[in-house]
Amino acid sequence: MSQSPKSDGNEPSAKRGEMIALCSAKGGIGRTVMAVNLAVALSKKNVQVGLLDGNFQFGDIALALDLQPTFTIKDVVEGIGEMDRYALSGFLIHHGSGVKTLAAPERPEFADLVTPAVIDRVCDLLLAQTDYLVVDTGAGLSEQTLQFIEKADQIFVLTTLEMTAIKNTKLMLETLEVLGYRHKTQLVVNRATMESVIKASDVPDILGYETSMFVPNEWQLATQSLNTGIPFVQNQAKTDLAKALFKWAEQLVIRREISVFKPKSGSFLQQLFHKTSKNITSIF
Ligand SMILES: Nc1ncnc2c1ncn2[C@@H]1O[C@H](COP(=O)(O)OP(=O)(O)OP(=O)(O)O)[C@@H](O)[C@H]1O
Ligand SMILES: [Mg+2]
């Protein structure tokens, strides 16, 4: 297949991956450790996975995967006018798992260079070459995070059982609902087995959302994953924490398979034609 270097990644034949945004109202909830482990867990399913560090001020994705980025999204911004998906490939850092990563700028003052328009373009170009694009967003509802939320196919809002996390998660979920994103928003309770006055099983009632994932509290494993840059799904695959992430990845793949292979009913004329041609075939 010939690939035109001038193609902009938006041609009709461009592959359209699924965009998964990991968000939280507060910082320190586990977005980064979940994002890297989810991306690596997905990559074990024989699919192309991209990982975008959307925490543009204080992104930790490169550190969490022990990568030394030659380029970051700041370099992409500088050439955005001429950028196509082939040029963008040159800015991605390849992790041993196969996950292709686009790192956050090296300094917080560069974060504002990444405008919503740039986010839109970069996501389209990444989605044209991946099956899944996992985005670790900044905490809260900044303009940049809202752009990811708008573009995402699925938004995972992470919370823990801490009172402040629950209170702010409720506000965030309410805001997403007002903005019309409830249909694509799911709740993830991270550190669900932690000691707390709030029980994980009460969270769906408290927040008014079905909870799609409960991730166990395994501080040592999670912290080791971040500190060593080796995702626990790679070197601690048999632990409950890793199993939760594999289950999450599995759910994403099953959901996508169902939506991709769901039979389309087609137009009335197409159905009529199909029926008529079947009858003609049976006559002969
Ligand atoms: N399931 C878990 N069990 C125990 N500890 C966890 C779990 N998930 C995350 N942590 C710990 O919580 C801390 C914050 O994790 P992480 O850096 O991934 O959060 P974050 O939401 O990305 O934070 P930031 O807002 O700084 O970007 C880390 O010490 C991490 O090890
Ligand atoms: Mg983080």
Image (cartoon, rainbow, N blue to C red):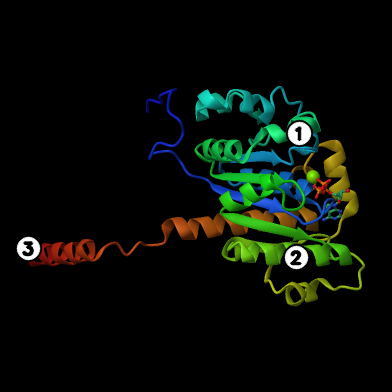
Residue indicated by mark 3:
284
Q: Is residue 66 visible?
A: no
Q: Quadrant of the C terminus?
A: bottom left
Residue 5 higher or lower than 96, as above or below:
above
How far apart are the two marked residues, 3 and 1, measured between alpha carbons? 64 Å
User: Residue drawn at (48%, 60%), measured in percent from left and top?
Assistant: 258
Which of the pair 218/239 is nearer the observer?
218
Quarter assignment of residue 7 = top left
Q: Is residue 268 left or right of residue 99?
A: left
Q: Give the residue pinned by disc 1.
A: 62
Identify the residue under disc 2. 171
Query: Is the residue marked by circle 1 packed among few (<14), some (14-19), or many (20+) residues within 10 Å?
Result: many
Q: Quadrant of ligand 2?
A: top right
92 and 58: which is toward the camera: 58
The answer to which image quadrant residue 90 occupies is top right
Q: Is 143 left, or right, of 131 in this rendering?
A: right
Disc 2 is placed on an element classified as helix
- Residue type of the residue flagged with mark 1: Ala
Q: Residue at x 59, y 35 (%)?
A: 118
